[in-house]
Image: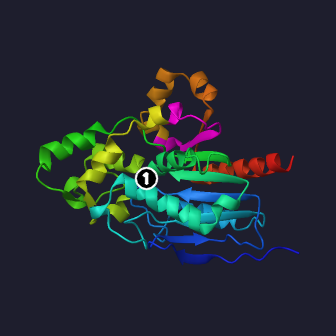
């Protein structure tokens, strides 16, 4: 008989919000965990993870977990009082309380800074025995020196930053009235300016996330064998990954377990994600 999934909404003991179809009685071998980008809200319109989740819901043999970080969406806190450590702690709490640790295998689908958070968490001793596969969507590039320089120049005395002042303007499509460099830095971190615009964010959080060399972290993190970067062409063309891939050499990335794919459309990207999930599932069976 086909399994009837029920998506539940729940809150952890410290107030972190998540969606899940995890069921003790109908537990599957694989759980998909969505690690959002900076400031992403799982209820926001056009959320890419929600689109992928709806595709996954058609599969009766895969469970999923989608959540909001501390200070984001329905979870407790504000980005104005948030540090990187808060994003890590809230992710850790949701994973443990939702029941993910019971699974044989997990696939982490990560947006922007979510790739760093997932990699850090699942390289921890509590999780490293799990069979884990990582899919990174628009993984951030090298250190975000532009953000730090702008803070030191224009926001020296502020501790809480108004996003409308950090990146003023409203034309998020053609960027005619927006500082494209700042816009792209936050976009690489997974931030949607339609959601971030008008919010306040802690200067310390910006320093936290802009001090990480994400590319170096991706290549050098130990105990992680299955990593794949998937992007669409528009991201690849404007992002420094093209130059970085030439510098580091794709063979070195492959030796580190990192593969790379670029697609013409979001729909093609979705198909690739579903194919990875199915391959992962088949490998467990075989």
User: Is residue 209 shown above or below 239?
Assistant: below
Identify the residue shown where x is 22% and y is 53%.
Answer: 166
Judge left or right: residue 145 versus residue 124: left
User: Is residue 227 shown above or below 58?
Assistant: above
Judge left or right: residue 101 versus residue 45: right
Residue 72 vs residue 120, the one in the foreground: 120
Task: Name the spot of residue 217 as percent of width and height, x first.
Answer: 47, 35
- Read off the residue under disc 1: 190
Task: Name the spot of residue 118 as percent of width and height, x first.
Answer: 53, 50
Identify the secondary structure beneath mark 1.
Answer: loop
The answer to whether one can see residue 195 in this image is: yes
Q: Which residues are magenta?
A: 218-235
Q: Quadrant of the N terminus?
A: bottom right
In the orientation shown, which residue stands out farthest toward the front?
125
Residue 195 vs residue 225, the one in the foreground: 225
Judge left or right: residue 106 versus residue 115: right
Identify the residue shown where x is 30% and y is 57%.
Answer: 171
* Residue 59 lies in quadrant: bottom right
The answer to whether one can see residue 197 in this image is: no
Task: Name the spot of residue 25 as percent of width and height, x first.
Answer: 77, 74
Identify the residue shown where x is 62% and y is 45%.
Answer: 128
Identify the residue shown where x is 32% and y is 67%.
Answer: 78
Please tell me whether residue 245 belongs to the stretch shown in magenta. no
Q: How many marks can you see? A: 1
Q: Within 10 Å of the Cα at label 1, are there few (<14), some (14-19), or many (20+) other Cα atoms?
A: many
Please tell me whether residue 227 belongs to the stretch shown in magenta. yes
């Amino acid at each position: 008989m086909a399994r009837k999934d029920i998506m539940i909404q729940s809150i952890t003991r410290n107030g972190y919000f998540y969606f899940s179809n995890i069921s003790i009685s109908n537990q599957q071998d694989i759980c998909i965990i969505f690690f959002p980008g900076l400031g992403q809200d799982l209820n926001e319109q056009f959320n890419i993870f929600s689109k992928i989740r709806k595709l996954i819901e058609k599969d009766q043999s895969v469970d999923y977990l989608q959540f909001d970080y501390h200070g984001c969406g329905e979870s407790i806190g504000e980005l104005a009082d948030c540090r990187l450590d808060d994003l890590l702690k809230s992710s850790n709490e949701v994973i443990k309380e939702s029941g993910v640790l019971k699974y044989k295998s997990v696939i982490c689908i990560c947006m922007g800074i979510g790739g760093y958070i997932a990699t850090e968490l699942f390289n921890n001793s509590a999780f490293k025995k799990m069979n884990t596969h990582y899919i990174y969507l628009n993984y951030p590039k090298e250190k975000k020196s532009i953000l730090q320089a702008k803070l030191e120049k224009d926001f020296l005395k502020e501790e809480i930053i108004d996003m409308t002042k950090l990146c003023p303007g409203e034309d998020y499509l053609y960027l005619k009235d927006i500082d494209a460099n700042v816009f792209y830095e936050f976009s690489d971190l997974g931030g949607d300016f339609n959601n971030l615009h008008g919010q306040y964010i802690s200067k310390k959080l910006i320093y936290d996330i802009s001090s990480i060399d994400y590319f170096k972290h991706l290549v050098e993190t130990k105990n992680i064998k299955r990593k794949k970067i998937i992007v669409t062409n528009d991201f690849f063309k404007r992002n420094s990954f093209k130059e970085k891939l030439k510098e580091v050499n794709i063979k070195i990335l492959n030796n580190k377990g990192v593969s790379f794919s670029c697609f013409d459309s979001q729909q093609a990207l979705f198909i690739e994600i579903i194919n990875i999930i199915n391959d992962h599932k088949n490998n467990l069976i075989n």
